[in-house]
Image (cartoon, rainbow, N blue to C red):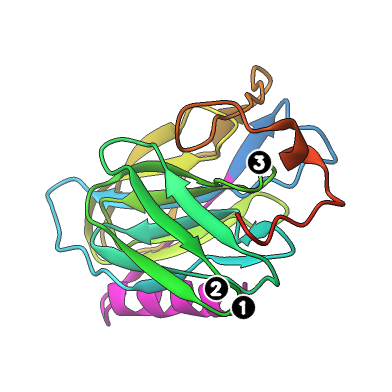
């Protein structure tokens, strides 16, 4: 997780320049249970177009969990999927436009994937149904995560932007802003997560996971 956050900071540093202006705001969320640990992403897409700065990121597999569970990256970035567990994993996604299957690989191994097209990629393990994550491939290099209070801050070069707030439990919310010389305070953006319903997923063959896959006491090293 620390490595991923450091990479995120590096990408944002590359995206900024000497003439960057601070843009800040707050996201208000409705219908999110107090116990839910939800990652909220805010990104600013230049309306007049801008070159995207890709990077290298990591989503590890540890304790039969992906870390982080939500990973925003600029389009064209490469993501490593290291297996830091003691068991085999099989990372895959059926999401369009870039479904993929990294195959079965053992503890200590790592495989990577280039994500060229902006989209939402839902990531799973073909062995462990509890392992779910999201890769959010963005058409911009300007993005950040909200803090626990919903606040966020971005440093943007002057121009016109479409600011979007996203969580996997809600439809995104957007606002258009103009950045000149003075800091910009964006009007509050709102997410309504009250209608979110968690849906079970299939394995990479489009079939239900076998019943034994849900037993945490069973170690299926040979699969």
Label at residue 163: none
Query: Mark 2, residues whose alpha carbon is within 10 Å: few (<14), some, or many (≥20)?
Result: some
Please say whether residue 24 is visible from this viewpoint. Answer: no
The residue beneath circle 3 is 129
The secondary structure type at the circle numbered 1 is helix
Viewport quadrant of the C terminus? bottom right
**103 left or right, relative to 17:** right
Name which residue lies at 67% across and 62% down.
221
Q: What stretch is highlighted in magenta?
A: 1-26
Judging depth in this view, the residue of 55 and 151 nearest the camera is 55
Kindly indicate whether the residue at mark 3 contacts the one at mark 1 (C-beta within 8 angstroms). no
Judging depth in this view, the residue of 100 and 76 nearest the camera is 100
Alpha carbon separation for disc pair 2 and 1: 5 Å
**190 left or right, relative to 30:** left
Name which residue lies at 66% across and 21% down.
197
In the depicted structure, whether residue 38 falls above or below residue 13: above
Name which residue lies at 45% across and 77% down.
7
Name which residue lies at 84% across and 38% down.
34
Percent x, y of residue 192: 61, 25
Percent x, y of residue 154: 43, 63
The residue beneath circle 1 is 2
**200 left or right, relative to 7:** right
């Amino acid at each position: 997780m620390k490595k991923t956050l450091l990479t995120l900071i590096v990408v944002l540093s590359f995206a900024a320049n000497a003439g960057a202006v601070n843009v800040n705001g707050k996201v208000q969320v409705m219908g999110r249970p107090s116990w839910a640990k939800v990652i909220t992403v805010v990104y600013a897409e230049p309306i007049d177009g801008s070159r995207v700065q890709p990077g290298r990121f990591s989503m590890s597999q540890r304790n039969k969990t992906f870390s982080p569970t939500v990973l925003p990256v600029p389009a064209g970035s490469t993501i490593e999927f290291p297996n830091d567990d003691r068991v085999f994993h099989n990372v895959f996604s059926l999401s369009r436009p870039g479904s993929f299957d990294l195959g079965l690989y053992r503890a200590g191994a790592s495989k990577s994937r280039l994500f060229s097209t902006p989209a939402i990629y839902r990531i799973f393990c073909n062995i462990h149904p509890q392992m779910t994550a999201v890769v959010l491939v963005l058409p911009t290099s300007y993005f950040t995560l909200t803090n626990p209070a919903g606040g966020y801050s971005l440093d943007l070069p002057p121009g016109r932007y479409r600011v979007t707030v996203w969580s996997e439990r809600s439809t995104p919310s957007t606002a258009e802003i103009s950045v000149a010389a003075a800091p910009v305070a964006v009007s509050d953006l709102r997410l309504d997560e009250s209608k979110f319903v968690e849906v079970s997923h299939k394995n990479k063959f489009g079939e239900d996971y076998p019943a034994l896959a849900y037993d945490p006491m069973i170690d299926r090293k040979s699969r």
